[in-house]
Amino acid sequence: MRDARGEVRWFDMQAVTRDPDDEDSVSVWTLVDITEKHQIQTALAAERLRLTALLRRFPGGVLMEDAAGVITTANPSLCALLGLPDHADNLIGQHHDALCERLGPERSAWLHQPGLTRGEKRRTIEVTQSDGKTLEIDWLPIERGGEQLGRVWLLHDISEQKERERALASLALTDALTNLPNRRSFMASLEAALEDYRQHPEREGALLMLDMDHFKKVNDTYGHATGDLVLQHLARIVRLGLRQHDTAGRIGGEEFAVLLRDISETDAASLANRLRQTLADSPVVTGDASIRVTMSIGLAMLDRQDANRILARADEALYEAKSSGRNRVCCHRESAITSP
Ligand SMILES: Nc1nc2c(ncn2[C@@H]2O[C@H](COP(=O)(O)OP(=O)(O)OP(=O)(O)O)[C@@H](O)[C@H]2O)c(=O)[nH]1
């Protein structure tokens, strides 16, 4: 109805017959002005429409449940992220437990979170699914005046971010020129191996220090870029010449180190000599140049000493190999340095 000013007003109209048994009985009409209630309901319906449109296009998954665990909101991204073939609306009205059953125990573990601790307003967890996808899940309780009204789950696919982080971490540990582990990464492997040897002293291992001979001359004659190719050539020879459980690293400009696990000194010296000989026998061919290079190697067996001390012993053996003519392997022993 319109009021005197022409504005639309909404009324709730009800008629009550005074005497229901008398056909001619008069009816009493009551009119209650519900304009405000109608306006609120219209505004709420519009708000809900806007929210639904937003959730439908929202790239993250959204799941809301009431205090009893009944799902009140779910969007299409949630179904896509969880690999559910359902239309999101079909989840609404289902109980939390039914969803857990559909996902299976492994994929629904995040839905069984213990309650938030005092002062915890939000909890973020990371879940890696069997297909390799990593999801970040935020859990937010819905409260009013201390009363729990339900909870919201927000899901984001962070697989690409995780992949970028992994790639960055790997870059930080890899030498860009040779793709071998860099000094930091190699030292970490050496420390871990030494820890292992401390616990199993019956096992043997060796450390090799490799250094190109007269490398400055290569740079001076052919240029730094060609010098880089020679370093890559050496890295390839080392990589191909090692056993699966050995580790090589570039620990300085033209210095490389190799960690040989479970090996006697005799076998370590033979392996070192094979690497040395392979380099000496395979010139680097670039343009019309064929560059022959050699390397010297120092060998020290792993013992109870720390990584730097063992590195220093291998270095002493390397110095000996250099000063006694280069292109050779020298082994460090506590009393002497010898050629194998
Ligand atoms: N191309 C290239 N050269 C490098 C790199 N890092 C270090 N070098 C060079 O390696 C050379 C090392 O020279 P020296 O320490 O004098 O040793 P050397 O000439 O190999 O002589 P000996 O070790 O005594 O046989 C220097 O010329 C450095 O510039 C690198 O990444 N690329």
Image (cartoon, rainbow, N blue to C red):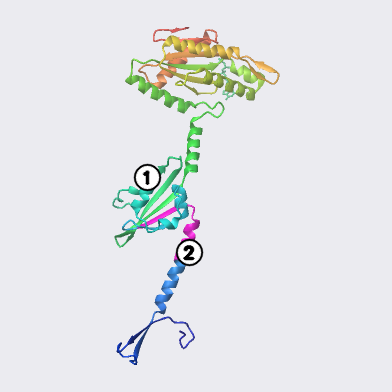
Beta carbon at label 2 within 8 Å of ligand 1? no
Q: Pointers 1 and 2 in contact (CB under 8 A)?
A: no
Q: Can see residue 318? A: no
Q: Residues within 10 Å of mark 2 (few under 14, many from 20)?
A: few
Q: Is residue 135 above or below residue 339?
A: below
Q: Which residues are magenta?
A: 48-65
- Which mark, residue 50? 2
Residue 31 versus residue 226: which sits nearer the camera? 31
Horizontal relation, residue 153 to residue 50: left or right: left
Report whether residue 190 is seen.
yes
Q: Amino acid at mark 1?
A: Gly
- SS category of the residue bearing label 2: helix
Query: Is label 1 within 8 A of ligand 1 (CB to nearest ligand atom)?
Result: no
**What residue is disc 1 on?**
104
Q: Amino acid at mark 2?
A: Arg
Q: Position of residue 69 (x, y in %)?
A: 33, 56
Dot placed on the residue nearer the N-terminal end, 1 or 2: 2
Question: Closer to the observer: label 1 or label 2?
Answer: 1
| Picture quarter with ligand 1 | top right
